[in-house]
Amino acid sequence: MKIGSLLVDGVRRYGLVDGDRIDLLAESADVFEVLATADPGHESGARRLPWDETGSVAVPFPVASIRDFITFEQHTAGSLRAVTGTGEVPDAWYEAPAFYFTNPYAAIGSGTPVPIPPGCAVLDFELEVAVVIGAAGFNLSVEEAFDHVAGFTILNDWSARDLQSREMRVGLGPAKGKDTATTLGPVLVTPDELVDYKRDGRYDLAMEVFVNDIRIGGDTLANMAWTFAELIAYASRGTWVRPGDVLGSGTCGGGCLAELWGWRGELQPPPLRIGDTVTMTVEGIGTIHNTVIAGPPAHPVPPAVRRPTSAPNLGGGEPREDLEP
């Protein structure tokens, strides 16, 4: 099953995609309930509309939250070279899957223009596949995790590299460097559609990215260091995952400019410019595309007011007899 979404008379509507047509679900239908019950969820004679991924389509499901992992070793090594000058992947990367939270309100569909983030001069893309949660779960094991999957979609993690680099030096982030747009689409594909691509818990899906129809790079999704079930289990450790939660695979090898800059030692290909169109294709899922446009101005925020600092008073209180000196 493939779920898509269109704006119909100004209202976001979901539907079942079949080739070049989409059968709209009832306005009150819950996408994740439809997927869980395999019930089409639309009345006989439901409205059928043309479906064209080369145009503009909406995010194919309601987004609750977005966690973005980093699971491709080649991308990790190349990106570190761009930031630190060394491609040595730290031991901590191998010990557990790392992720950050990004802005669910910045999720956009394929075909939506992407404004340059205010103050950004080094805009980049990141080619990923995301797994979407369809049923709530708490502290799931790897064996339990996949039962909570609704489906898969393409994810483009738009990145303002100059903003990201500055803010991550503080020890937090990324934040504003990732805050403007995350493309999801063109459809949400259920796991049964991808069974022929599955290899040892991973999906051998060809992934490619183009800028203005020039191929920049690509990889196979099978090169993830962890399976999606393992990512879900880790994300749910001690907490809930719920329908609409998005877990990105992280950027595949050769799937962004920053990695290429790291390997080449120069900003080639150059950062994205106004008018550039980024197109991403993932086997079995489809194609997304967005064009970069001018963004809003960066309204100034003053630097911090520096205050005199000193060590806090570490004394006070009576000594405790149960503590050794």
Image (spheres, helix red, strand yellow):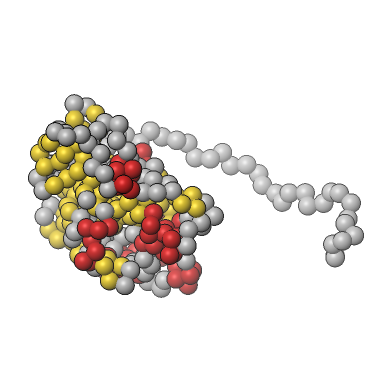
Camera-side residue of 243 and 105: 243
- The image shows residue 290 at horizontal and vertical percentages of 19, 45
Q: Is residue 251 left or right of residue 95?
A: left
Residue drawn 47% across the image and 66% down it: 96
- The image shows residue 139 at horizontal and vertical percentages of 51, 56
The answer to whether residue 102 of the structure is visible from this angle is no
Instruction: Please count the marks in the image.
Output: 0
In the figure, 118 relative to 89: above or below?
Answer: above
In the figure, 140 relative to 304: above or below?
Answer: below
- The image shows residue 113 at horizontal and vertical percentages of 21, 40
Residue drawn 31% across the image and 72% down it: 200
Report which quarter residue 5 is drawn in.
top left
In the figure, 2 relative to 70: above or below?
Answer: above
- The image shows residue 314 at horizontal and vertical percentages of 78, 52
Residue drawn 22% across the image and 27% down it: 10
In the figure, 283 relative to 61: above or below?
Answer: below
Q: Which quarter of the rendered picture does the C terminus lie within?
A: bottom right
Camera-side residue of 132 and 305: 132
Residue drawn 56% across the image and 38% down it: 305
Q: Is residue 132 left or right of residue 141?
A: left
Q: Is residue 273 left or right of residue 302?
A: left
Identity of the residue furthest to the front in this view: 44
Camera-side residue of 23 and 96: 23
The answer to whether residue 284 of the structure is visible from this angle is yes
